[in-house]
Image (cartoon, rainbow, N blue to C red):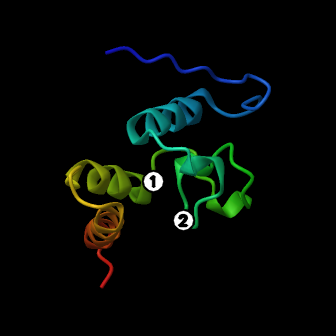
Amino acid sequence: MHALIVVDLDKVNGIRLSAITDEVAMLALAQTAAFDACQPVVGIANLTAPCDAALKADALSSSDQAYLHALYAIDPNDSLTQQRSKIAYEMKKSLGAR
């Protein structure tokens, strides 16, 4: 398989290259359009989204890692509702939430 990822240089002007590469990796691995909007947790996916600076990470955060781990642990045959519940559960478990 191949993937082509295009980065708008005007949008990332002034952002460290390592942060841009982490965001691109997250977007490629997650393959979702959900990152077009601000996420409610500190994460690299918020780097170029219209978010408050406090929610923008400059590297993969623990929330990002928990999300990717949970995303790749779900059963693709489950319903969307089941998948969302499983992702939330796995993230809480990974992040130590009770």
Please state which amino acid type lies under the numbered disc 2.
Val
Horizontal and vertical percent position of residue 39: 58, 60
Looking at the rendered image, the disc whose residue lies closer to the viewer, 2 or 1, is: 2
Which corner quadrant holds the C terminus? bottom left
For the point 27% across and 52% down, which residue is it? 69
Is the Cβ of the residue at disc 2 closer than 8 Å to that at disc 1? yes
Pointer 2: what residue?
A: 41
Quadrant housing residue 17: top right
For the point 33% across and 79% down, which residue is it? 97
Q: Is residue 70 rendered to the left or right of residue 8?
A: left
Above or below, 9 relative to 84 = above
Nearest the eye: 49 or 87? 87
Quadrant housing residue 55: bottom right
Q: Label 2: how many residues lie within 10 Å, few (<14), some (14-19) or many (20+)?
A: some
Nearest the eye: 3 or 23? 3
Rounded to the nearest whole Å, what is the CA distance between mark 2 and mark 1?
A: 10 Å
Pointer 1: what residue?
A: 61
Q: Residue furthest bottom?
A: 98
Please state which amino acid type lies under the numbered disc 1.
Ser
Q: Residue furthest right?
A: 10
Q: Which mark is residue 45?
A: none
For numbered disc 1, what is the local secondary structure?
Answer: loop
Q: Is residue 45 rendered to the left or right of residue 85?
A: right
Going from N to C along the chain, the mark reached first, 2 or 1, is 2
Q: Label 1: how many residues lie within 10 Å, few (<14), some (14-19) or many (20+)?
A: some
Above or below, 92 relative to 55 = below
Horizontal and vertical percent position of residue 12: 72, 31
For numbered disc 2, what is the local secondary structure?
Answer: loop
Q: Is residue 3 rendered to the left or right of residue 18?
A: left
